[in-house]
Image (cartoon, coloured by chain):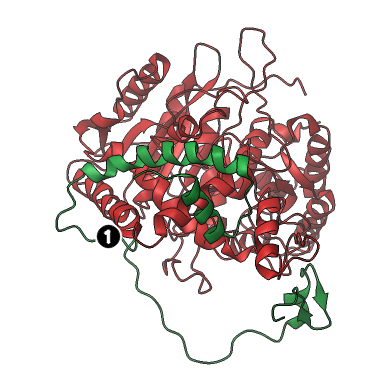
Chain colours: A red, B green
Amino acid sequence: MTDFSRLGVAAIRDGVAKGEFKAVEVAEALNARVSAAKALNAFIVETPEKAIEAAQAVDADRAAGKPLGKIAGVPIGMKDLFCTEGVQTTAASHILEGFVPTYESTVSANLWKAGAGMLGKLNLDQFAMGSSNETSYFGNVISPWRRNDGSTAALAPGGSSGGSSSAIAARLCPAATGTDTGGSIRQPAAFVGISGIKPTYGRCSRWGVVAFASSLDQAGPMARDVRDCAIMLEAMAGFDPKDSTSLDLPVPAWEAGLNSDLKGKRIGIPKEYRLDGIDEDIAKMWDNGIAWLKDAGAEIVDISLPHTKYALPAYYIIAPAEASSNLARYDGVRFGLRDLPDGAGLQDMYAATRAAGFGEEVRRRIMIGTYVLSAGFYDAYYTQAQKVRALIARDFENAWASCDLILAPTAPSAAFGLGEKNADPLSMYLNDVFAVPASLAGLPAMSVPGGLSKEGLPLGLQIIGKALDEQAVLNAGLAIEQRSGFTAEAGEWW
Amino acid sequence: MSVDKDTVNKIARLSRVAISDAEADKMVGELNGILAWVEQLGEVDVTGIEPMTAVIPNKLRLREDVVTDGDVRDKVLANAPAKEGSFFGVPKVIE
């Protein structure tokens, strides 16, 4: 009998289309795996009935000879930042606990229309603010990976899309949605040895996605290989009149366009990413990546992105500023939690509700955002950060004169243990040092597995492309995937 | 620039987040750590640089000025924590 947990998106889609197995069989098998993996805490809500219902519809369509969607019969996980009609959507916060949307996000609606089914809503860092999935109100997600020294220490699955990364690496689902504001798809993908792509800002609609920092938020897929990411992205992307920043462009046939022959492509290696004291394993993996791309026919060129070191501080002004504005809507009046102390007036109710409903990191970012936007400080912080952001985008523009793609590590280290980086918010922020520049510039960027650290943990290689050139990013990812020989898996301890 | 406890309390008020005395003390250190770190942006020469407003050039679309949505009162109210009839309920605002 087929072990459906071993099949990816393409294999499930093709098997269902050819009649090798029924979509319902796949949904049942993965529902069982989800339900048996509670120790990972990857899901906030499980929706086995949704997975079965979608699969039955696909099986019925096939029996009736109707055309099937792009990902017909594939059960997936949905990050709990996407509003799903009739299914609780929390952004992993207490303030939205019990919130049941009366509408469906555009991205999730696109996926259901393409024939996917929902296994459940995936855990994440609260309001997508975090890099380790430790800020969720619903508890930490645990990575399926463990160090190779026999230790059973719980490791971070990365964040904010930590439920997505953990569930895919543990083979609970073949693919999942993620969102990336400053690395939230790429860093968790790197931490668990899977692939994930953040497309160009505007490719995927933000409508119905709980907002964090609107000028940066972008949805994208996570899966176990590059082809599966291409298939998922095709189903998720597309123009949406309901999002004013949605790009009015056709969705390219990324899967059909996959081609790992990189002849004629120039790959830039940014010298500023080779930080002093860079981790030895990371440096070695990066060198391997360079050799693999050369072997695929690409030319390697040295480039400079001079404002790289300012990306992270600019991000930690811009993102909290936008968050403080976006999160003003949680007031205890229209939806979500209300905390009304005895005899309290409206203002006290707001303050009590938001203190009770937001976690520590969310409150910290709202406060920073409020401060940098406040009278007298706006220009010194926010305007300056937006100017630096323009310079960071210009660095990339200048680089494209001499290269077509950029290769760098995804994160500065392998996965760290839960609790190891909690004492100082800054040390956690620094984990996104390589991911944030592409976010600030709105560029497509992908992480693919690049090897293992000395501790036996996955490391990710990041490919950054020109705006709208997801195809080149995917192709380079494929070229790496075909050469890295990455087959390592987490042992099934849960 | 560094913040003191009064400033933290003021930011908390502006943010509409209730904050205890102990939390305010802790926040002083955390905010100052983060603000000291972001202040390195001040050393970047931004002469003649316009602040970024859109990462991908995109023009704002216009649409016909017609009603395309609405008439969904019950959906709008469905998640209200204290609905009163067809209204959102709030504590008394005017004494």
Residue A382 vs residue A131: left or right? left
Front position in the image: A193 or A435: A435
**Residue A220 locus on image (x, y percent):** 53, 50
Residue A117 vs residue B14: left or right? right
Q: Helix, strand, or loop for circle 1?
A: loop
**Residue B30 locus on image (x, y percent):** 49, 37
Is residue A474 among the parts visible in the rendering?
A: no
Vertical order, A434 against A256 (above or below): above
Q: Residue furthest top?
A: A149
**Residue B64 locus on image (x, y percent):** 47, 90
Q: Residue furthest left?
A: B48
Q: Quadrant of the N terminus of chain A?
A: top right
Which amino acid, by three-letter code, is at mark 1?
Answer: Pro
Front position in the image: A439 or A385: A385
Q: Residue at x 22, y 41 (%)?
A: A403
Vertical order, A123 against A333 (above or below): above
Is residue A275 among the parts visible in the rendering?
A: yes
Q: Quadrant of the C terminus of chain A?
A: top right
Vertical order, A306 against A231 (above or below): above
Q: Residue at x 20, y 36 (%)?
A: A304
- What residue is disc 1 on? B51
Q: Quadrant of residue A160?
A: top right
